[in-house]
Amino acid sequence: MRILIVEDERAIAELVARGLKEAGYHVEVADSGAEALKRVEAAEHDLLILDLMLPDGSGLELLEKLRLGGTDVPVLILSALGAVDDRVQGLERGADDYLGKPFCFPELLARVRALLRRGQSLAERLQVADLVLDCTRRKATRAGEPIDLAPKEFSVLEFLMRHRGHPMSRTKIVQHVWGTSYDGLTNVVDVYIRLLRSKVDQPWPEKLIRTVRKVGYVIEGEGAPRR
């Protein structure tokens, strides 16, 4: 999941970005409306977190430009303007949610997850054979046994499971999980696949993650899911 934070206060932007990254999301930061527009045009995002007071204009003006341009990405306004009238205006002009500053990060994270669930038609529970991924709670189990995954490990596994049976190239994995097309990261994919295999496959006789020569990786299973 790719989240764009539009916030010119560096301390707040860094706080929110760090927390969301630790929760397993790919995060970008734009400190102006102009930079935000460029980033939205350059790549797809799953959620925007938008401040209303930007150095080059109003966040509401930016929001209107995005909506008029056909962008339907969920938008969470995060602003010090927390009066009822401000909230109503933000929601009426295209925001999906509104959270005032100061804020509690666990509440922000809960709202982010709710908006992502609302904005995506993606399954919240994925399963291949007896491997189960709970995308809402970001938990993994195999044959009922919990598997401890780091955020990036979870994201790589989720991407493969959402494309079960379809080989995914290293470049596609990098673009989705790291949010970049930098080819130099493709070797990192091999490292994470080895880590995943040690946790997801090694303890069990049926191996789910497979290498597709000259293509990349695929996850698929022959065994029936255990319930």
Image (tube, helix red, strand yellow):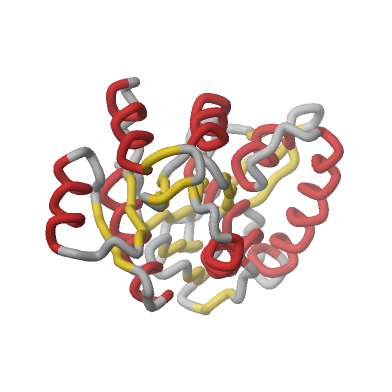
Relative image position of residue 116 (x, y in whole percent): 35, 51
Compared across the picture, whether 204 is left or right of 162 comes to right
Q: Identify the image quadrant of the C terminus.
A: bottom left
Measuring 60% from the left and 76% from the top, which residue is drawn there? 148
Residue 176 seen in the current view? yes
Q: To which quarter of the image does residue 95 belong?
A: top left
Compared across the picture, whether 53 is left or right of 180 comes to left
Q: Who is closer to the viewer here, 137 or 115?
A: 115
Relative image position of residue 112 (x, y in whole percent): 37, 59
Q: Is residue 209 above or below residue 136?
A: above
Residue closest to the far top = 69
Compared across the picture, whether 7 is left or right of 186 comes to left
Relative image position of residue 5 (x, y in whole percent): 50, 51
Measuring 25% from the left and 55% from the top, which residue is drawn there? 97
Q: Is residue 42 above or below residue 32?
A: above
Relative image position of residue 186 (x, y in whole percent): 80, 40
Measuring 42% from the left and 46% from the top, which residue is drawn there? 48
Measuring 26% from the left and 49% from the top, which residue is drawn there? 118
Compared across the picture, whether 46 is left or right of 42 comes to left
Q: Is residue 69 above or below residue 123?
A: above
